[in-house]
Image (cartoon, rainbow, N blue to C red):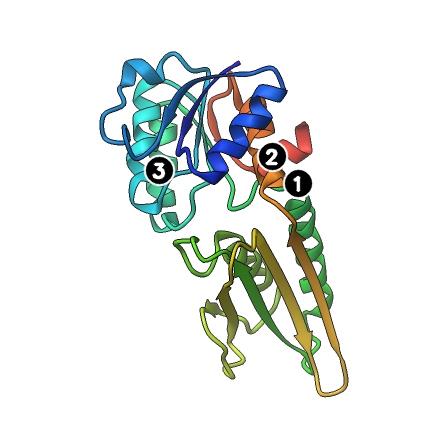
Amino acid sequence: MNIALIGYGKMGKEIEQIAISRGHSITLKVDVTNASSYTIEELKKADVAIEFSTPESAINNIYKCFEADVPVVVGTTGWLHRLDEVKKACTDKKQALFYASNYSIGVNLFFKLNEYLAKLMNGQAAYNVSMEEIHHVHKLDSPSGTAISLANQVIANMEGKEKWVNAATENKAELGIISKRIDEVPGTHTVTYGSEVDEISITHIAHSRKGFALGAVIAAEWVKGKKGVFGMGDLMNNY
């Protein structure tokens, strides 16, 4: 399979290594030197594009893939306020968009655990839930897309929780997310239910970027030849 890498930083290089090890070819690499000049014709040489750029450039890159008729796997976060718009464009143009806040298989199992725990804790008034996420100092968005996904799961399954805030909070209707940026930490997410007498926590710790990169390549393999809007739930249910 021919892959276009849109975003050739640390994650892009990790994806490249895994893609090549799985027998794929990289036909286009987009970084700061050609981000504004790569062409539709260059994109058309790829079977799938994998997009890990910046929140500011992600939308334009996605639409460029739609124009080139190339399925796009998007790992960039920080642009979700426009997700509905992009999904509609994908459907209208009969293209393929695969989006996930986190491509790690382990994190997506963690999502399932988080959802189940939230359902168990619903109605347990003695406990209040909070979250912490830790990432490397280069991460541009806060809180992380993964933290937002976790928070939205909790809110959907717990009565009384109405929204998340990116700070500690005493408001019972809010879910507080504490964001920390430390050295080169790939990603740590903890969900905690605390009461006066005890505490229940679940944590996912990424040891490297390899898990994210492998998941993105698997998603690219899976989405090739498909049309529509997809996510890790689709992949894990059908892979």
Q: Which amino acid, mark 3?
A: Val
Closer to the chain start, of discs 1 and 3, is: 3
Residue 105 numbered mark, or none: 1
Label 1–label 3 contact, CB within 8 A: no
Q: Residues within 10 Å of mark 3 (few under 14, many from 20)?
A: some
Q: Could you give the CA–CA distance between mark 1 and mark 3, rounded to whole angstroms?
A: 25 Å
Q: As rendered, which of 157 and 141 lies closer to the eye?
A: 141
Q: Is residue 62 left or right of residue 145?
A: left
Image spot of residue 164 (x, y percent): 48, 67
Q: Are marks 2 and 3 in contact (CB under 8 Å)?
A: no
Which residue is disc 3 drawn over?
Answer: 86
Disc 2 to disc 1: CB gap under 8 Å: yes
The residue wearing badge 2 is 215
Q: Amino acid at mark 1?
A: Ile
Spot occupied by residue 154 in the image (x, y as percentages of width and height): 59, 62
**Residue 36 screen position, x and y as percent:** 23, 30
Q: Amino acid at mark 2?
A: Gly
Earlier-in-chain disc, 2 versus 1: 1
